[in-house]
Image (spheres, rainbow, N blue to C red):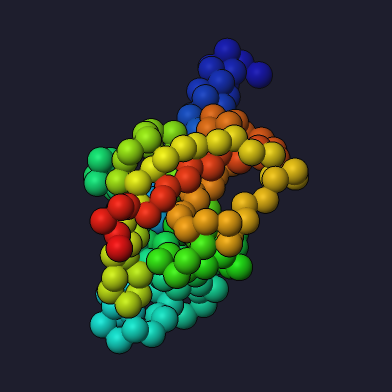
Amino acid sequence: MTIGQKKKAVALAWATAILLCLGFGTWQLGHGLYINAKAQLAQVLLERAWQMTLADGKPHKAWPWADTWPVAKLEIPSLGLTQIVLSNASGEALAFGPGHLVGSPQPGRGGMTVIAGHRDTHFSFLSGLKNDDHVIVSTADGVSHRYIVGQSEILDSGLVRIDPFSRPGIAFVTCYPFDSKEQGPLRYVVFASPAPDAG
């Protein structure tokens, strides 16, 4: 092999490596944009399904194959946050928003409503909630239930369960610690009680 052929081979190898890197980078970027677009579209579809539920009082799925539907809307005025709460806390549901834990009462129906969400997406805001922050949960019947944050606790899910009939209020649950990559038994729980003017 001559020196010229070696230079061409090296140049071809570099060009191939660069093209492969560019191709992989483009694929990664495209995949990231796709996931983001899918998440944004899901929120639009969930909001539409929620509005349909408010209009006729019936559950509406955001897309035909969904295993969940909107049951409430959560608002945290101090954080400027609004989220649709889904009918269960299955893995698919939690990928798109916080979910109402089946077996706990609906908001405003007496007892402790339990709503779960992922710590790194929809419930990442829990670390910023403070005592006396206001929470508004609007239900499918159009009624807004007002709560005030009272306390937060770190609980071991293997040892402690939230009693849904212990007292009126709402409990927001997510995995803990917030920055962990592993799923462990610890849960960060924020408890809120009905606001005094809630009747």
Q: Where is residue 79 in the image (x, y as percent from the top left)?
A: 28, 40
Residue 144 sits above or below residue 189 on the image: below
Q: Is residue 46 above or below residue 160?
A: below
* Horizontal relation, residue 121 to residue 175: left or right: left
- Residue 177 screen position, x and y as percent: 58, 31
Vertical placement of residue 174 versus 54, above or below: above
Q: Which of 10 and 51 is in front in this view?
A: 51
Residue at point 32% right, 52% down? 195
In the depicted structure, whether residue 30 falls above or below residue 18: below
Query: Residue at the spot x=39%, y=43% of the render?
Result: 149
The furthest residue to the top: 3
Residue displayed at 64% across by 38% down: 155
Residue 31 visible within the image: no
On the rendered image, what quadrant is the N terminus found in?
Answer: top right
Residue 134 appears anywhere in the view: yes
* Quarter of the C terminus within the rendering: bottom left
The location of residue 56, given as percent across then percent down, is 30, 86
**Closer to the camera in the image, 162 or 180:** 162
Residue closer to the observer: 23 or 102: 102
Image position of 69 (left or right of 2): left
Please tell me which residue lies in front, 30 or 81: 81
Quarter of image, res 182: top right
Q: How many labels does the image show?
A: 0
Measuring 61% from the left and 68% from the top, which residue is drawn there? 103
